[in-house]
Image (cartoon, grey):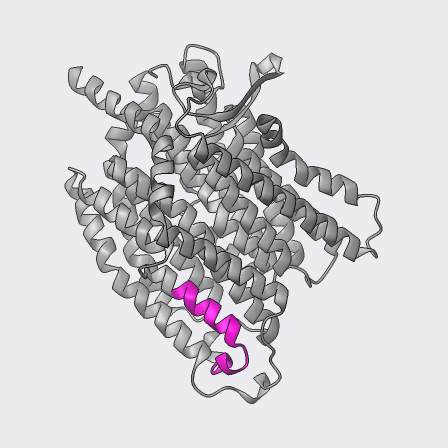
Amino acid sequence: METVLFNLIWFLPLLAVLVCVPIPSTQIKTIKTIHVATESLILLLVGYLVYSMYTASGTPANSAAAPLLLHYFTDIPWLSMFNAHYIVGADALNILLLFLTAVIVWTGILVSWNIKGNQKVYFALIQLLATSVYGVFMSFDLVLFFVFYEMEALCMYLMIAGYGSGRKDYGGKKLTLTLALGSSMILATLFGFYFEGGIQSWSIVELSKVTLPMDFQMWAFPLLFMGFAVSSSLFPFHFWSPDGHSAAPTAVSMLAAGVMMKMGAYGCLRVAMFLMPEAAKIWLPYVVLLLIFNVVVGPFIAIRHKDLKYITAYSSISHLGLIFLGLAALTPVGLRGATLQMISHGFLTGLFFATIGMIYERTHTRDITQMGGIMRKMPFLGVGFVIAGFAGLGLPGFSGFIAESTIFIGAFSCESTWVRIVTILAILSITTTAVYILQTANRMLHGEMPAKYESLTDGSFREKLVIVILVLCLLFIGIFPTWISEFLDQSIAPIFENISRANITAIGG
């Protein structure tokens, strides 16, 4: 029964779109109610599956999914001419990423309640985007994975170009074309898996049982890793993020930064590193040099910007760099920190972009130099933004402190000198992060308030609910980190075991 419920996760958003097709656009209240009800159901469903998996963590997962510890495993022949199967399942990392996605989609719908334009189409696109992300985090067949992975780029462009602000057409095209570049790199490598694996299979489970030829791994790993890293704004493919976020409507920024950018890091870990551990050992010490831009230069660029979304976008680039630092360390603690940061940063950026969108809806500007003293008129929204800032700083008690500390410990325990140097630089860059966070909050919320803002109102009940939910998620992980760390270790173990074996093989060779 739970396996059936799990398979409904990606299908229910599509069903909501189909149900709304015959409903006239004038009945927008009915349409919005259907979408909210659908995502509420998915959120409850995923929450139940997280609880079920956590309580059953001591029992063996489906043996057909070995060496991965997957629950809710389904393997059905799909495209026989390509030998592709419908293979889905979840371990601790997948189910927590699905929960993160469900929360961000649900809150994204709530903050989009008064979106301008054709609301029927807008909410349908949100659900299609949700289908794409759910599918990526559920798939364990590379064809199925790629189909879901490709869906999000088109949905993102349509939502930015149709409902965004500023240079929305430019931002949408820049985002889409850059992601398309990453996708072409991924697709080229996936064909290599199929033909070089020797088993003519697209299954991640089956491919993990074979050792791919080193001459293939040496070119395929950097191509695949960087192809996925495009979505996560790893330097030098970071340039789409600020313009894309700036032009996007609030919910799209929440989804892009909160979950879509995690798809890239997830692909690097689940596909590139897991299936090519030998090449990972060779290439990742060089990849870590790229992180100097993300974790050191990114915060300095954020300081000089005045647009709230640009500031948050460069903040995300910096925080996502820490995920790759944890991956590059190739230690159990580093991998744990990287996966914790995926979850933590998703809730953090969701809160950041939600509060920015709410403030923009009232002030009609994101330029912090044109604001001042708005805390007096919007205390709840102001406090929500400040909490997001403190969480981004890694304040103890919030999830960011746990995730970043774990990454730093795991990375510094790595034997690579380069990894240790970048770790020290990342720790020192926390000071730079504090500068732009405190500077932004002070200029926006304090000081003399312009007369034009005298009529501003605080958040509605719906908006306050969004802020409270996201803050509670950040606090829960920060105050009770043990359960999620131990839970994620179940996902990390098979990946690290593959990497450890690769190390022994390399030495033995």
Whether the magenta-drawn stretch holds residue 358 is answered as no
Which quadrant: the C terminus?
top left
Q: Where is residue 172 in the image (x, y as percent from the top left)?
A: 57, 52
Q: Position of residue 161 (x, y in %)?
A: 63, 54
Residue 7 position (above or below residue 123): above
Q: Where is residue 15 in the image (x, y as percent from the top left)?
A: 72, 38
Q: In the image, what residue occupies the spot 42% across and 66% down? A: 387
Q: Nearer the viewer, residue 352 or 80?
A: 352
Residue 451 position (above or below residue 28): below
Whether the magenta-drawn stretch holds residue 387 is answered as yes
Residue 326 position (above or below residue 303): above
How many numbered badges does the structure rendering display?
A: 0
The span picked out in magenta is 372-389
> Toward which corner of the image does residue 274 lie, by quadrant?
top left
107 sits to left or right of 229: right
Q: Position of residue 92 (x, y in %)?
A: 43, 34
**Res. 29 visible in picture:** yes
Q: Nearer the viewer, residue 465 or 432?
A: 465
